[in-house]
Amino acid sequence: MNEKLKALAKAILALRLKKKVILNIPYVLVGLFCTNLGEAYRLSIGKTFSETVQRMVLYGGFKVAFSNMLPSFHAFDLVVGICCGAALKLAVYIKGKNAKKFRHDQEYGSARWGNHEDIEPFEDPDFKNNIILSKTERMTMESRPADPKYARNKNILVDGGSGSGKTRFFIKPQLLQMHSSYVVTDPKASIINEIGAAFVHEGYRIKVFNTINFKKSQHYNPFSYIHSEKDILKLVTALIANTKGEGKGGDEFWEKSEKLLYSALIGYIHYVAPPKEQNFSLLLAMLNAMEVKEDNENYKNAVDYMFEELKENDPDNFAVRQYAKYKLAAGKTAKSILVSCGARLAPFDISEVREITSYDELELDTLGDEKTVLFLCMSDTDATFNFLISLIYTQLFNLLCEKADDQYGGRLPVHVRCLIDEAANIGQIPNLEKLMATIRSREISAALVLQAKSQLKAIYKDNADTITGNCDSQIFLGGSEQTTLKDLNTILGKETIDMYNTGETRGTSQSYNMNYQKLGHDLMSIDELQVLDGSKCIVQVRGVRPFLSDKEQ
């Protein structure tokens, strides 16, 4: 091993020495040539310098010295050659140190539209193994390409106003590639009707959750995916974030109190209730049984006795500890908390919702095991039940990440793509900014489809920029929302253009003038973006020039 290291060190030193020799060859050649100048001077030397120059030029000093082009090795001539070679090298060194840095035609910006050569290294030779970005731009599904510099995550942000073709030009082409498992938000339930048969033909498992018509939906029970205390907290957080009933005047006290009670009740259901009864119907029944009397602090309802029994059997139980904290509230306060809980869970009082969440058929934790497509059909006019879609996404991301880590060594066998159309209308997915950064390595990706970037900021506040930053690809299909246009205009940058002015002066003697100059110009101004050709889209991939492309696939 030591001999190999020594041999490698010698090879490196030899390469460095060879490089130095090659770089100094021109100076050596000039020095050898200048020895002839030294010879001419030595043969023509006179009493004065002018006499010496005269002899060199007029009386054959140069002619004699250069009659033989071989260098002279007389000591004086060699000194002259060495001095000339060294002077040349010094001049080159000084020139290099003081060289001005010009970027011709890029003085005010170097932005330009990309071409096929720019995106080609990011494409897969097999068309089917690509994400389709536009008619001419694609990106490989391979998350670990041979050359790491071409690795990009598969998260995509799509902006497009109403009617810009988000479903037709983006969602459907992604689905029809059929190289992954898919979870797609389907407003109006139109996508499943139009291309659902194609997935059946390809042998996909089909899952459907329909909040427009519950009779056409499979069942989804969030309780089926609770396996630990942290799963209880995740469910409660998602439920709080996406349901109405903000408590008293938006005071955080009421929200935190509700969270304690939900955690206690759901924990009790998880640890004590039979699997078939673990659902929202039992949660509502327990809330309805929690009678509180303001004038009797010692009154105990049925749920109090249930928790007392659980405390005797398991005093350190998570549900018991959470319920004890809730019971610190006085009677009047406890009654207000119960009212807030009732308002928040009002949608579950509907018999159809209780039935659709009574048991589970979606099998969210198996989407990465084999090719599956899950259609999440929701209304684009009524957001009453959209919180259920958000709960699905919340649990889906967490379940798949845990399964990838615990069973598959960190990577799912089948990539799962989440095509979240109307991402701003399904509610808030807790910790989405963190999930977007971490799901990549587990073979999971998300495409957020919005009408404008301002929608993302309205829901996720300061985290919106983090979410956007974790999308290596962005597509603009057209729109007029000013925040989106300004951000895009800034990202596209400026190009350097040539401009000339002409002038005319009239008077006793007429004169004309013309001057040229360079200016910076937006690659595409806000006005141009606002009236973008309806057949065009702008594609951006991190580290690659932006593309102005056709939408049509």
Image: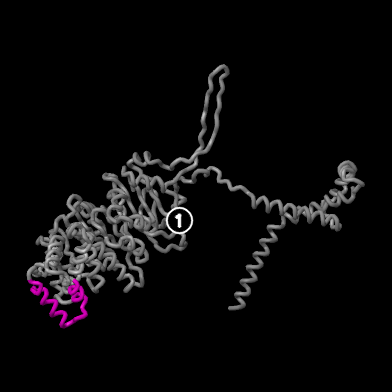
Task: State the SS at label 1.
Answer: helix
Q: In the current view of this chain or complex, which residue is farthest to the top?
A: 508
Image spot of residue 432 (x, y percent): 30, 61
Please say if 219 is above or below 489.
below
User: In front here: 250 or 409?
Assistant: 250
Image spot of residue 438 (x, y percent): 35, 64
336 sits to left or right of 51:
left
Image spot of residue 526 (x, y percent): 37, 41
Please say if 125 is above or below 452.
below
Q: Residues within 10 Å of mark 1 (few under 14, many from 20)?
A: some
**Residue type indicated by callout 1:** Pro
Q: What is the basis of the colouring in this image?
A: one colour
Image quadrant assignment for residue 184: bottom left
Number of residue marks: 1
Image quadrant assignment for residue 522: top left
Quadrant where the N terminus is found in the figure: bottom right
Instruction: Give, as a single range, the part of the protein colored magenta.
Output: 296-325
Q: Which residue is mark 1?
A: 121
User: In front here: 176 or 252?
Assistant: 252
Residue 84 shown in magenta: no
At horizontal 15% and vertical 82% (from top left) the residue drawn is 312
Q: What secondary structure is the stretch in magenta mostly built from?
A: helix
342 sits to left or right of 9:
left
The reply to whether residue 417 is in sight is: yes
